[in-house]
Image (cartoon, coloured by chain):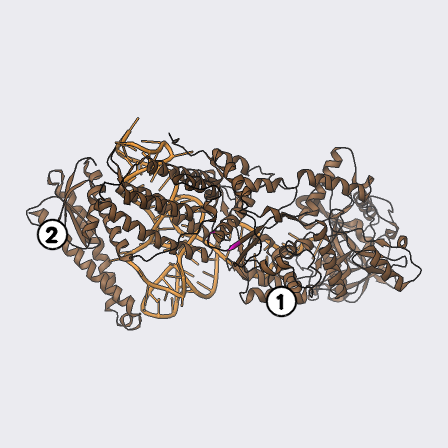
Chain colours: A brown, B orange
Amino acid sequence: MEIPAKYDPALTEDKWYSYWLKNKYFHSEPDEREPYTIVIPPPNVTGVLHMGHMLNNTLQDVLIRRARMTGKNACWVPGTDHASIATEAKVVAKLKSEGIEKTDITREEFLAHAWEWKEKHGGIILEQLKKLGASCDWDRTSFTMDPELSEGVINTFVHYYNKGLIYRGVRMVNWDPEGQTAVSDEEVIHKETPSKLYYIRYYISENGKPGKDYIVVATTRPETIMADAAVCIHPEDERFASIKGKRVLIPLIEKEIPIIEDSYVSMDFGTGCLKITPAHDINDYEIGIRHKLPVNDILDKWGKLNEKAIILVGEDRFAARKKIVKMLTEGGFLEKEEAYTSQIGYSERTNAVIEPRLSLQWFMKMGDASVEALRYVEEEKIKLIPDKYRNTYRHWMENVKDWCISRQLWWGQRIPAWYLPDGELVVAANEAEALSLAQKINPGLKSEDLNQDPDVLDTWFSSWLWPISVFDPSKPGFPDKAPNRDLAYYYPTNDLVTAPEILFFWVARMIMAGHEFCGDLPFRNVYLTGTVRDKQGRKMSKSLGNSPDPIELMKLYGADGVRVGMLLCSSAGTDVLFDESQVEQGRNFSNKIWNSYRLIKSWNADESAHTPLRSKTAVKWFDALLSQSVEVINDHFEKFRISDALMHLYKLFWDDYCAWYLEIIKPAQGEPVDKATYEATIQFFEKLMKLLHPFMPFITEELWQNIAEREEGESIMICKMPAAGNYSSEFIIKAEQAKQAIAGIRSLRQAKGISPKEPLELYITDNAIPEELYSFILKMANISEIHPLLKKPSDLNGSSFMIDTIELFLPIASLINKEEEIAKIDADIAHLTGFLSAVNKKLSNEKFVESAPKNVVEMEFKKKSDAETKIAKLSAAREELLK
RNA sequence: GGGAGCAUAGCUCAGUUGGUUUAGAGCAUCUGCCUUACAAGCAGAGGGUCGGGGGUUCGACUCCCUCUGCUCCCACCA
């Protein structure tokens, strides 16, 4: 049957993926084998696959497939994250497009919409992962808001609350007055905005009345002066020495506030005098805490001035700004105003100017947990790859702040705190327990007297339990509970593949939760991938439109091609500059593999044909090379050098197997291949497919299935990975010399315009290459006869070149230009002489000979003698030419 | 502003406790080939002194200091 000349991934990918699913190869159950476990970093449930996911999940699939083929019980747990902020934003936008405002519907109605959205769009990304070939155990698919997982989250909250580690506190949040919600730092877009800096006089108070002296304060927000709690100067600022300890009056409202000193103020900005408004600026808030200043909040949640402002009550903050400037001018308080550009935060969703606003939030104390989490990494019980991230990790863990775990959203796990009518609160896993706790405080309370906190928990507060809860959702919150069978078997997991950006948000916190609830680390290795960027180094993003659609890419180049393209240029921790040409390279490699298969398939094995020496030697050589490669690849994997492992295989297959091995054993046109060689060739091919399978699952399965008879239910993905046998590395080096000789002859042919079809004779003036390897040279360089000689006969003319200290000589005198030849030799001699003098300089240095290790010194002596031999031979050849 | 990291061929990267023939790979480039598996191919070739400067050492791409440029994380100046 005719095999098409090009590999068509469309004909194989879906076919084999369903075959794998049907045979349940991805599914894992605990057994007596050693487990190898990866939990997927759960993508947003409503997300779509982007290039970062491609890289990340390809790496995980390579690791898991390889583990499966090395006899481990491999389990890759997939799932999705409810991603409160992102998902809620999408649902709000969708409702808005239907004319429904979130503020007009109840929490229950909103959640019904959200779940509907999740059912509709959730899991698209998981379907896309299947296209990539991801061998996840889909029976174990989890969602961070599955009922059992949510229960674990609530129990975790209760656990830490009862331990005294969760508390309520005041914090400044990014308030969006239009969206009527707090937004996270990530959702605030800072834009350079032209504004004005107003210089306002604050008169020194003399018994509560304005004196004649004043100081000038610069501010961009004059409408907040009524909330000022102090005016602040730098303690070492000489200019203000005379007014230290005095008090000033806020203009217009004549409220007396102190002058305080804090080194936060920079003396060279503005007037060196800063107004402190704890309620409306995060830095001022912190200064306020240091100096125990009162907090005076004059803005309501709409961004309008409230009655505490005394003046301009009910005005919007921007309208108030204009009006107060006018009032200050009229009152003679405004010294000057100047144009000023500042970074203003805008809400990503409503584009409203963000208002820093104080609010009550829930926090978790991080102190002790971070010490433990740091220790796992410092003691290398958990390895970060690359390890440069240890520094970053340490720095963060040593400076960790308490974790704000509440979010003013509805989509997520609702905080299990209930408020009593008198303001007291109880925390319990459910309302019934909350009521009974409440009744201990006040026996008369009924359930309708309790009000549950409206906020939900930060998404990370559920995903930090992920490696535990995917196996045993009932474990979080209960350190003393015995683990179930799955958790006992699969936990700790082995490797985690994720992005460095979430090292703290997620990785560190999983370590904390693992330590708290399982008394053990959640994973042993954390492989941190780089960011996928475009050719110009820009982050791939939707708004830039520079991210290709992975699904389209796979259609064009095949899943295997895309996987190879991504992996070839992605060592751990370094960013991937994505370019479609890389994927093209991957596709070309698939095609190369495909065509080698076509060649082998076109041969007939003949039992009666004898085995030529070159084939016998080629089998011996490639067998050795394969064993050596297995060792190299194993080493690469141990060190998580995934792209190096792939590159090694790429070259092994393309160069060594195709360009050398197959060409050497290739019979003359129409001739059969002897049986022994044919079988060895098939075996090599199968081993290569197995080695390549973790990287290129589809094409390797297709060809492995076709190269020999297979039973239904057999698959390459459950085969044993080839192991290294004994081999002679000496022989590999000798074969390398033979290959170099061939390349040298080919190069000479091209330089002299001798067709590859014209046979030549060859003289070798050294017996360093074993005779069996002559057979390679005969075939691959089209040599009719090789004359091994101890010394080049003086009556021969032609061209020579050297491989190590072996001199090779082609008697092609008629084609030789003596002057060119001499010039070439002179250049070589000059190079070698320079090299030799460097070596001699080292060797004549007594300190070197004394202090360098013996083998290094010996190596230098070998360099010296080799260089001298080469120079001697070249000089002799030069003499010959001069005759 | 605080912290971390990077700088090696045109591009993307290796270079594993400083020493294996005066730096390696892939891609790209150039030259010659439609050689009956593959032009998504075959054969061959050229190309860097390792960002600049200083230091330690018998010896530095590799260690230290410094300058320059870039990236990331955190905090963001009224």
Q: Are marks 2 and 1 on the same chain?
A: yes
Disc 2 and disc 1: Cα gap in Å? 71 Å
Q: Residue furthest bottom?
A: A850
Name the subunit of mark 2.
Answer: A
Give the quadrant of residue A270. Answer: bottom right
Mark 2 and mark 1 in contact? Answer it, CB < 8 Å: no
Which of these two is toward me, A703 or A824?
A703
Where is residue A574 drawn, in percent x and y? 49, 51
Residue indicated by mark 2: A789
At x 57%, y 37%, the residue is: A545
Amino acid carrying label 2: it is: Leu
Counting other residues with Cα less than 10 Å from the Cα at mark 2, is it few (<14), some (14-19), or many (20 or more)? Answer: some
Which of these two is toward me, A697 or A500?
A697
Where is A256 relative to A140, above or below?
Answer: below
Q: Is residue A104 visible?
A: yes
Amino acid carrying label 1: it is: Glu
Q: Which residues are magenta?
A: A69-73
Dot 1: element: helix
Q: Mostly what secondary structure, the magenta segment? A: loop
Residue A549 in magenta? Answer: no
Where is residue A478 drawn, in percent x and y? 71, 63
Which of these two is toward me, A880 or B54?
A880
Q: Determine which of the numbered discs, if any, sits on residue A372 in the image.
A: 1
Dot 2: element: loop
Quarter that holds the N terminus of chain A: top left
Where is residue A343 drawn, in percent x and y? 67, 47
Counting other residues with Cα less than 10 Å from the Cα at mark 1, is it few (<14), some (14-19), or many (20 or more)? Answer: some
